[in-house]
Amino acid sequence: MLAFINAILGAILLIAGRKIFWLMVGVIGFIIGVQVATRFFHGSDLTTLIAGLVLGIIFAGLAFFVESLAIGLAGFLGGGYILLSLAGLFGLDKGIIGIIVFIVGGIIGAALIAVLLDWALISISSLAGASLIIDAFHFRSATAGLIFFILVIIGVAIQGSALRQERRAKAHA
């Protein structure tokens, strides 16, 4: 069930993560909640799902009401999740190394968001969406890397095209 939810959420982030920012932040909160519950509490699938939903709802609410704080938080959490997912392909996502990788990814993600808001949102949502899909289907090794790369390109292309259309429409209005 969780894999199906991850695949659906990943597809949504790939296609429209920047446009529905509050959902992107909520999805990232959901992912973090599930990851924390899985790694530290080893509970049932229901407990894991509830932890993810609670954190996702909190993050989505933050994004909706406190947008600037949520943007930085989304960048940090999204960057952390992405780098941790990539590190997991090499077995570097456990223990203190995993925490350090997450923090480094978070700092990079927050910095990108601060400097390049629209393109950073597109990049982070595409990377996070691709990571979710890879996790949902349990791809491994070279196959995972290739599919991840293709999904990121698709997500950036779709969202970048939408952004350019929006900017053209504003310029002509």
Image: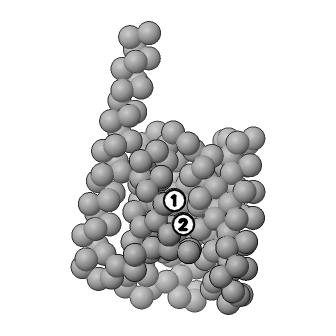
Type of colouring: one colour
Q: Mark 2: which secondary structure?
A: helix
Q: Mark 1: which secondary structure?
A: helix
Evaluate whether residue 13 shows in this view: yes
Q: Can you name the residue that lies furthest to the top here?
A: 173
Evaluate whether residue 108 shows in this view: no
> Disc 2 designates what residue?
5
Given residues 49 and 113, the one toward you in this image is 49
Q: Which residue is at 42% across, 26% downward? A: 166
Asked if residue 74 lies left or right of residue 156, the reply is right
Type of the residue with mark 1: Leu
Q: Find residue 66 and report its image quarter.
A: top right
Q: Which residue is at 42% across, 67% downward? A: 133
Task: Look at the picture and state if 12 lies above or below 147.
Answer: above
Is disc 2 in contact with disc 1, using a CB cutoff of under 8 Å? yes
The image position of residue 27, as x and y in percent, is 59, 58
> Disc 1 designates what residue?
9
Given residues 108 and 27, the one toward you in this image is 27
Task: Look at the picture and state if 47 lies above or below 21.
Answer: below
Q: Which residue is at 36% across, 51% downward? A: 155
Q: Which residue is at 71% across, 87% downward? A: 43
The image position of residue 64, as x and y in percent, is 70, 42
Task: Look at the picture and state if 172 lies above or below 108.
Answer: above
The image position of residue 63, as x and y in percent, is 68, 46
Asked if residue 45 lies left or right of residue 138, the reply is right
Q: Find residue 37 and report its image quarter.
A: bottom right
The image position of residue 169, as x and y in percent, is 40, 18
Give the alpha-carbon distance from disc 2 to disc 1, as whole Å: 6 Å
Given residues 68 and 21, the one toward you in this image is 21
